[in-house]
């Protein structure tokens, strides 16, 4: 038996009681990315729905089942422990790929190692652009949003470019970073 090739990209998907949308997310990844390129890691935060039955036995993924909901960050950190890829993609379970642009994103990071992290453009279900970047946040924004109740202090906006550009903050819905930088 030939040794298994190390994947270029490890995709970590935390989930909690979202079996159907997580399954759709996985299906779009497998539909657009070569299996040899990607490793899919689903971290189930103690779901009480049918997540284990629908996703847990899928041979195309690594399925980790936590006994309780440990939260988004901890689930990602648990997933990283199983990640073999040169790059990590932290992906919300409700995301769906519409093409193979993750390959180009990885190539872009490969060619631009000075970049810390990148995120893709987000689309709504009707394929119109969705906000995926945020302006530089400040203590004033946090105070306004969380203590004074002024909503929309952390508004996402749509980048007005079709080429990669520097932004203050990318949405946590999909974040691509090199494995080595994450470890640092």
Image (spheres, rainbow, N blue to C red):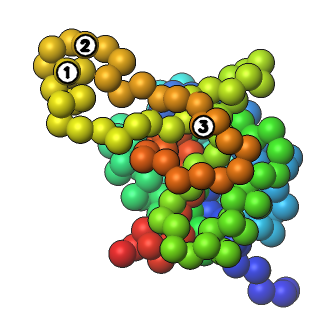
Q: Is residue 79 above or below residue 131?
A: below
Q: How far separated are the C-alphas under marks 2 and 1?
A: 5 Å
Q: Residue 144 carries which label?
A: 1
Q: Earlier in the sequence, mark 1 or mark 3?
A: 1
Q: Please rate how many residues cluster around mark 2, counting C-alpha atoms within 10 Å: few if below 14, some from 14 to 19, many from 20.
A: few
Q: Where is residue 112 drawn, in percent x and y?
A: 61, 73
Name the element at disc 2: loop
- Is the Cβ of the residue at disc 2 closer than 8 Å to that at disc 1? yes
Residue 33 image-quadrant placement: bottom right
The quarter in which the C terminus is drawn is bottom left
Q: Is residue 42 visible?
A: no
Would you say 73 lies left or right of 94 here?
A: left
Q: Earlier in the sequence, mark 2 or mark 1?
A: 1
Q: Who is closer to the viewer here, 19 or 124?
A: 124
Q: Name the residue under label 3.
A: 159
Q: Is residue 169 above or below residue 77?
A: above
Q: Mark 2 points at which residue?
A: 150
Q: Who is closer to the viewer here, 103 or 56?
A: 103
Which residue sits at x=78%, y=52%? 101
Q: Where is residue 173 drawn, in percent x and y?
A: 53, 39
Name the element at disc 3: loop
Q: Who is closer to the viewer here, 177 or 63?
A: 177
Would you say 114 lies left or right of 55 here?
A: left
In this view, the residue farthest toward the front is 160
From the viewer's perspective, is the residue at label 2 or at label 3 nearer?
Answer: 3
Q: Earlier in the sequence, mark 2 or mark 3?
A: 2
Which residue sits at x=40%, y=37%? 135
Q: Please rate how many residues cluster around mark 3, counting C-alpha atoms within 10 Å: few if below 14, some from 14 to 19, many from 20.
A: some
Q: Where is residue 137 drawn, in percent x and y?
A: 30, 38
Residue 8 image-quadrant placement: bottom right
């Amino acid at each position: 038996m030939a040794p298994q090739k190390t994947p270029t990209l490890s995709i970590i998907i935390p989930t909690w009681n979202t079996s159907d949308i997580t399954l759709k997310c996985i299906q779009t990844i497998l539909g657009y990315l070569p299996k040899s390129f990607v490793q899919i890691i689903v971290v189930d935060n103690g779901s009480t729905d049918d997540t284990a039955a629908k996703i847990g036995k899928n041979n195309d993924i690594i399925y980790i089942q936590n006994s309780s909901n440990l939260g988004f960050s901890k689930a990602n950190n648990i997933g990283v422990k199983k990640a073999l890829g040169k790059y990590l993609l932290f992906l919300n379970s409700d995301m769906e790929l519409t093409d193979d642009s993750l390959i180009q994103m990885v190539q872009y990071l490969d060619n631009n190692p000075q970049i810390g992290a990148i995120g893709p453009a987000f689309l709504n279900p009707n394929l119109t652009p969705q906000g995926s970047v945020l302006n530089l946040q400040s203590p004033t924004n946090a105070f306004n949003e969380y203590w004074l109740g002024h909503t929309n202090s952390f508004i996402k906006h749509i980048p007005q470019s079709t080429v990669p550009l520097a932004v203050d903050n990318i949405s946590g819905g999909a974040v691509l970073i090199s494995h080595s930088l994450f470890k640092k």
